[in-house]
Image (tube, coloured by chain):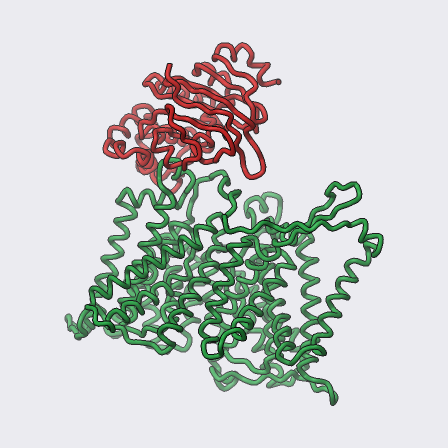
Chain colours: A green, B red
Amino acid sequence: MSVDVVVGGLLQGVYFLLMGLGVVLVYRQSGVLNFAHGATATLAGYIAYSLMQLGLPYPAAAIGAIATGVIVALLIELLIVRPLAHQEHMIIGVATFGPGLIIIALIGWLWGQAPFALRGPLPDTQLTIGAVRIGSNELLSIILAFVLLALLYWLLIRTRFGLAVRAVSEGPLTADMLGIDVPLARSAVWAISGALAAVAALLITPHNVLGPSFLTDFMIGSFAAIVLGGMESIVGLAVGSLLFGLITAEFSYYVGGRLQSTLNFVLITVLLLVLPYGILGRRLERVAEPRIGSLRVSRFNVKQMVVRVPVDAVERVIPRRLWWPLTLVGIGAILATVPFGFGSLAVFTVASLGVMFIAAVGQNLLSGYSGQISVGQSGFITAGAYTFALLGHYWQVAPVVSVLVAVVLSAILAVAFGMSTIRLSGVYLALLTLAFASAVPEVVAYPQDVTGGQLGMPVLPGFTLGPGLPMLSVIYWIIAAIALVVGIAAHVLGRGWFGRRLLAVRDSEAGAASIGIPVALTKLVALTLAGAAAGLAGALSSILVGFIAPDSYTVWLSVYLLVAVVIGGRASTVGTVLGAIFIVVIPVLASSALASSTAAVWSQGFFGVAVLAVLWLFPAGLASIVRFVAVRRSSTEVTSKTFASVAG
Amino acid sequence: MAVCLSLQDIRSGYGQVLALQGVDLVVDEGACVVLLGANGAGKSTVLRTISGVVRPHHGAVRFRGQDITGRKPHEIARLGIAHIPEGRGIFPGLTVMENLRLGTFGLAEAARQERPSVDRVCALFPALRPKLNDPGASLSGGQQQMLAIGRGLMSHPAVLMLDEPSLGLAPVLIDQVFEALRQIKAQGTTLLLVEQSARHALALADHGYVLNRGTVVQRGTASELTANLHQAYLA
């Protein structure tokens, strides 16, 4: 093993550590995984670059960058985390994607997409220490990383401020009652995290590049290192980062970098099987506090609209037993006529909506009902799509069979994934699904001769049509019909005994187990159904698009699906429809409303704004906007039904 | 005797639910007042309204003549009103010592007297001394209650409010806790106590209030209430 490889690995580990410090600090304190941390760092890096372009000396530029990081982090805390403080950490985590996307868009708009080279704090020279050759800035990074680590450790463990911060993380209400200014302590932690983001940008980017999304991607890569050490411990972070840096360096030296994400995934899975909280992490214990704060409503929230439905009057016109069939026939009829009234772009968009809806139904079972946070559904979608494509391409298998095989294979993959992750909870599961979603595209690209590698491969529908039948319309009808069936099945399943079991597991695993619900099995079934739905969506999507590549379904798609569930309204079928519409239509709207040159840059930013707006105004999701109340002649409210009633 | 704490026509509650429907209450300086009543009578809400955890819709809370209605919990804690919540509020991941140190965050001058205050608490509850470096989660229920009271005393508060200190404790431990409260009272700290164990509480208290469904249904000296104890609970 060569010295250079070891040094390179350690250096990479140090960069993971620098990126992870701010993430772990905020997570430890508030339980929120701040997905905007990388974007905050990037903005700080660009500010430093521009200040130096203006002729300012390096220290001034660095101070400007740190100030930027602090301000951005404080804004995120003030505008997003605080208004949503009474929400679940999952929702706050999803919300931080908003500012992340907005910042990336802002950078693209102000500085363009082309990456810059940010210079390091020191003049670049090569130093030789014994057998080790290392650049001056790299050496400085290593030293600074450990100085910062020690400082942070001292601050948290040894000072009164650190004691207050730890108290706030375990019991905010109790800390408040003891005389600790909780909002101030929280803001202080976010400010420190923002400063750490800026320092990370100043040290990491000179060794790499300064691009709009580079540090966000780097942050997602560093999650593996963070999980390895344990999310709750900053010492664990150091151990995990260095270990992970070394392992990946050795691996890419001897095996090559093409399976890097796959290695990450396998490594974390195996480690978490043995140590479910990483090397030095532990279950965060909290003070049992009365949920008084949860009843407080944010000042942004819009009041729910209540629609009173005179049930008796409706029943006199249409008998009750016909309500469901008529509703379904109505929806079916509207869906069927779409290809006649609209152009092919609209038909394609609605068909994509159907595909997204199927995947979102699975995501809702998994995250909305059973409370398992996954950002890995794109992995199952990719698996389903490639299964369909390969079966049709090499063996000319009938499309119906191919779709079924794709569904079954994705489900089996989900079972395998679930068997090794079922002990995990919260952020550990979420980060493992993220690693999974990053690994699958690498695996499908690896056998280049078979799958076409990064270039992808064409997908044939596998059936031919008589003359005069437009292919797109037929594919649309197939997708619409399947989406309708999936929607009905999910609704029935969710409202029945299985849905109640999932909700029980979501709200209290211990409580569910105590009344005889097999918790692990229930979670595994939810994961399997979600995997099957994703596989189905992948197969249908590949037919619709006619082409697949490893990057057709990225991690961002997984994030969008989770957003669909949160935005629509958890554990709600109507919410899933609205959420799917949201994630398909908002980007389309954005790109058609904006000039084409800026569309690509701003569409994600627009999406981020929309996510934040919905979460501010309707934190229980779009489905909670309207509440239908059945009114009977006796004028007492006999049944009241909310679209999101189960979402609480 | 000077009035320490007073509540005037307090209406308070959670969301749409009004837990207190016009409560008047007076606690004299150095006195011990006990709130009695069935579950859901609003006893805990009285303490939460005083300490700012719940904001009243109507009425005024006064501390030594100063209107403190609607202030935030940490601001009220810094005035010298310590609230030991139901369930004790021990930080499970912090050591016993750290839990005690958190008691000094209410007052800046208390921070400078950390060591003597810890010694004072350990003198009151000797069981805590060997546990100082253990995590809060490792304590038994009785030790947690002692730690909670000790933490409340760390800032030398003017008023100590306790929410059911006897909850879930063995009889011998209840006696210990009340003995400690007796000593605290003897040192001049004003006590406001919510308690189900009425006999213990009335033995310690000077005055008492009986709450039912958010209103005061009976008030009087401890001896008067002791005589009517059955009536109070069967009403």
Front residue of A404/B220: it is B220
Question: Residue at (25%, 57%) from the top-left corner?
Answer: A148
Q: Please say if B85 is above or below A162.
A: above
A86 on left or right of A491: left
| Residue A60: quadrant of the picture | bottom left
Front residue of A268/A68: it is A68
Question: Residue at (20%, 64%) from the top-left corner?
Answer: A59
Question: Residue at (58%, 38%) from the top-left corner?
Answer: B16
At which x and y percent is residue A575?
62, 59
At which x and y percent is residue B51?
42, 32
Front residue of A394/A99: it is A99
Question: Residue at (19%, 68%) from the top-left corner?
Answer: A57
Furthest residue to the bottom?
A467
Q: Please say if B173 is above or below A546.
A: above
**How many numbered dots are placed on residues in this image?**
0
A62 on left or right of A642: left
A257 on left or right of A367: left
A280 on left or right of A396: left
At which x and y percent is residue A423?
50, 55
- Is residue A251 shown to the viewer in this render? yes
Front residue of A569/A540: it is A569
Q: Quadrant of the N terminus of chain A?
A: bottom left
At which x and y percent is residue A89?
47, 53
- Is residue B132 shown to the viewer in this render? no
| Residue A466: quadrant of the picture | bottom right
